[in-house]
Amino acid sequence: MPVRLAGMLTPQSNNFGVVRIAMALAVLVSHGFYLHTGTTSAEPLVAWTGHSLGEHAVQVFFFLSGILVAQSFERSASLLDFAAARILRIFPGLLFCVVVTALVLGPAVSSLPLAAYVGDPGLMSYLLRTASLATGSAPLPGVFETAPAPGLVNMSLWTLKYEVLCYAGLAFAGCAGLFKPAWRPYAAAVLAVFVAGVFIEPAKSIQLYTPFDNIRYFAVFFASGVLAYLMRANIVVRGAVLAVLFAIFIATIGTPVGVLGAAAFLGYGTLYVACWPAGWLRALANRYDVSFGIYIYACPIQQFLIGQFPQAGAVGLIVLAIALTLPVALCSWLLVERPALRLRVSLAGALTARLAGLRYWKAQPVSGPARR
């Protein structure tokens, strides 16, 4: 019996949680080679596909986010309810990570005395710029200055602002009628044209992308996920299709349509892996969603370990980083992220009260909350 995307959208019916954790670990592994050497050419897959393993993992993240956030939007009781869910999924965990990094890890490893560290304007700059998603490359005073990738505190955070922009774009499209049943065929067609045309240009390194390039690049993968969600009743997951898309992916590497080839193959490949029987692993990943915690804590932990064990090889440091990051991510989920998600109704109510009298769109209610 063929599996359709429409039949695998509940956490009990897919491995999306497992995939997210695997992709977060892939980012850790990829960054481990870069942080150990200070050069992007050391990261896996760069020489072959033009993108690192971590970049491909982020592509999968954005595709999955497109599916799950579209589902969340359609199930939300209101636009403010949707906004509350998105805010609570990112910002409590992020803010806690930023504070812990700046006020606990920073003083412990900084080359500056504590008084000088606390009094340095760079500390407040890091807190404000990182927490506001303005940048993921803000330095901390005297922190990781002699590392192979000097001054880099948390390189993973730079993608979060683009994810938030994708959320905003989806909300705008949803308010414009993207999810109205009568408009669905036309909406899917328009979105397909958008995905097909938004990033067709000569291939270049992602390090050379402008902010506008980044918006278009991430929009391809996020919009592909949204398109998959809109067409969920028609998407059948088959190995033969995946093989064809893999051939297209290989053939388009380094071409003007290389990003589109990657989006098609990685997106469909994600769905293919998500239908595998996973038993206890699926249940564990659904119960303990440590993917975000791994993503936001791995880099500072890896930089710390490089400073403590400068003679260790890249692989050894990656193993140590995984062993240390997993329990930290679990604590983040149990103590910060999951409790924050339970405040969704309260936050939506507070936002509604503050905006009382304003008119806003209400989505068609669907039973059961959606997960990121």
Image (cartoon, grey):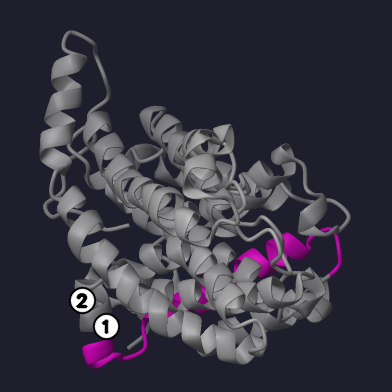
Please say whether residue 23 is visible from this viewpoint.
yes
Residue 371 magenta: no
Please say whether residue 50 is visible from this viewpoint.
no
- Residues in magenta, as a range: 254-281
Residue under label 1: 282
Q: Residues within 10 Å of mark 1 (few under 14, many from 20)?
A: many
Question: Extreme top residue here?
Answer: 357
Residue type marked 1: Arg
Q: Nearest the camera: 146 or 301?
A: 146
| The C terminus - image quarter | bottom left
Residue 271 magenta: yes
Residue type marked 2: Gln
Is label 2 or label 1 in front? 1
Q: Residues within 10 Å of mark 2 (few under 14, many from 20)?
A: few
Contact? badges 2 and 1 (CB < 8 Å): yes
Which label number is shown at residue 12? 2
